[in-house]
Image (spheres, helix red, strand yellow):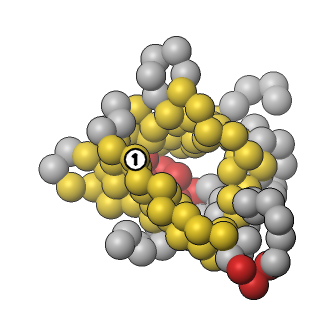
Amino acid sequence: MDKLRRFNNEETDKVNIYESTIIRMSNDSDHNIVFVVDWLEGDNIKIVFKDVSDVIYDLKRNLAYEKEQIGKLEIRGFSYERKDGLYTVQFNFDTELLGVIRITCKSFAFFVPSEPITTGGNDKMIL
């Protein structure tokens, strides 16, 4: 990755993350939440959530996949909405894992290694 391109908040509509997989979740030195995503369009991307006030993990194993392990976090929907100066960002899962990860934060950004091939968008599926 030579230089990462940054897409902030609503600009993330330019980046398609559908069927990409969250491979790591962590906190950085500034106490932001960071997801590393195995991006279908190229190298891994980072998603950074700043000034997080709430995180909800509502996930369960999809028994139809009949696997021993917990399964992968394949993104099947990405939504966000802005209200009262905060963003609610939601990732939907419906393959090996069922459910959502929902984060409330002041801002979020995607850091991608190249210009996206296809556009993403806001699925507008906040529960």
Q: Position of residue 17 (x, y in %)?
A: 66, 59
Residue found farthest to the bottom:
64
The answer to whether residue 78 is seen in the rendering is: no
The answer to whether residue 27 is seen in the rendering is: yes
Quadrant hosting residue 71: bottom right
Vertical placement of 8 versus 65: above or below?
above
Q: Position of residue 90 (x, y in %)?
A: 45, 60
Q: Is residue 19 left or right of residue 35?
A: right
Vertical placement of 95 versus 102: above or below?
below
**Residue at the image position 21 percent from the left and 55 percent from the top:** 83
Callout 1: SS: strand
**Residue at the image position 83 percent from the left and 65 percent from the top:** 68
Q: Position of residue 80 (x, y in %)?
A: 40, 60
**Residue at the image position 81 percent from the left and 55 percent from the top:** 41
Quadrant hosting residue 96: bottom right
Q: Position of residue 120 (x, y in %)?
A: 60, 65
Residue found farthest to the top:
29
Q: Residues within 10 Å of mark 1 (few under 14, many from 20)?
A: some
**Residue at the image position 52 percent from the left and 15 percent from the top:** 29
Vertical placement of 40 versus 94: above or below?
above
Q: Quadrant of the C terminus?
A: bottom left
Residue under circle 1? 55
Q: Nearer the viewer, residue 104 or 59?
A: 59
Q: Amino acid at mark 1?
A: Val
- The mark tally for this picture is 1
Q: Quadrant of the N terminus?
A: top right
Residue found farthest to the front:
68
